[in-house]
């Protein structure tokens, strides 16, 4: 089974970063995510993919919440995702990063901490 890692980046307004990945179909929008490389943990892969797709470099000790891994309907992919709230990480200011995905937007989603 192929394993992927991804991060839901939630800003202080409770909006999730959605990107149009480079080289993908015009209708493809997603959180930063991708395949794990050999020897990577799901979180290491999620951090790397976030950096590669967005230019947001999160520290390994970033405060995060694990989400239960999800399999696709064919059962051949397993996505490990994490929630990272800007408000839990006062040293982060995501608006200061020059995002490198083709296009992006912050999507209304959760109010900070409403998910608990």
Image: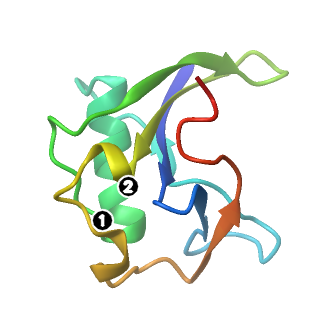
Residue 60 x %, y %: 16, 38
Figure label count: 2
Q: Nearer the viewer, residue 17 or 51?
A: 17
Assign a secondary structure to mark 1.
loop
Callout 1: 10 Å neighbours few (<14), some, many (20+)? many
Q: Residue placed at 42% from the left, 26% from the top?
A: 65
| Residue drawn at 82 percent across, 20 percent down | 74
Name the residue located 25 percent from the left edge and 48 percent from the top edge: 89
Callout 2 environment at 10 Å: few (<14), some (14 to 19), or many (20+)? many
- Asked if the residue at tag 1 contacts the one at tag 2, i.e. Cβ–Cβ closer than 8 Å, the answer is yes
In the image, taking residue 55 as reference, residue 17 lies left or right, namely right
In-image side of 17 versus 60 (left or right):
right
Q: Which residue is mark 1?
A: 56
Residue that numbered label 2 is attached to: 50
9 is higher (above) or lower (below) than 28: above
**Residue 46 in the image: x percent, y percent?**
38, 40
Residue at (25% x, 27% y) in the render? 40
């Amino acid at each position: 089974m192929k394993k992927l890692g991804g991060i839901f980046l939630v800003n202080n307004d409770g909006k999730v970063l959605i990107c149009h990945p480079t080289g993908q179909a015009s209708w493809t929008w997603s959180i930063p995510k991708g395949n794990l490389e050999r020897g990577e943990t799901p979180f290491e892969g999620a951090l790397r993919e976030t950096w590669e797709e967005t230019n947001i470099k999160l520290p390994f000790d970033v405060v995060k919440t694990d989400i239960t891994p999800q399999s696709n309907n064919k059962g051949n992919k397993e996505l490990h995702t994490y929630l990272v709230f800007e408000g839990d990480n006062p040293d982060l200011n995501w608006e200061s990063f020059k995002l490198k995905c083709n296009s992006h937007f912050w999507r209304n989603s959760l109010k900070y901490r409403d998910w608990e």
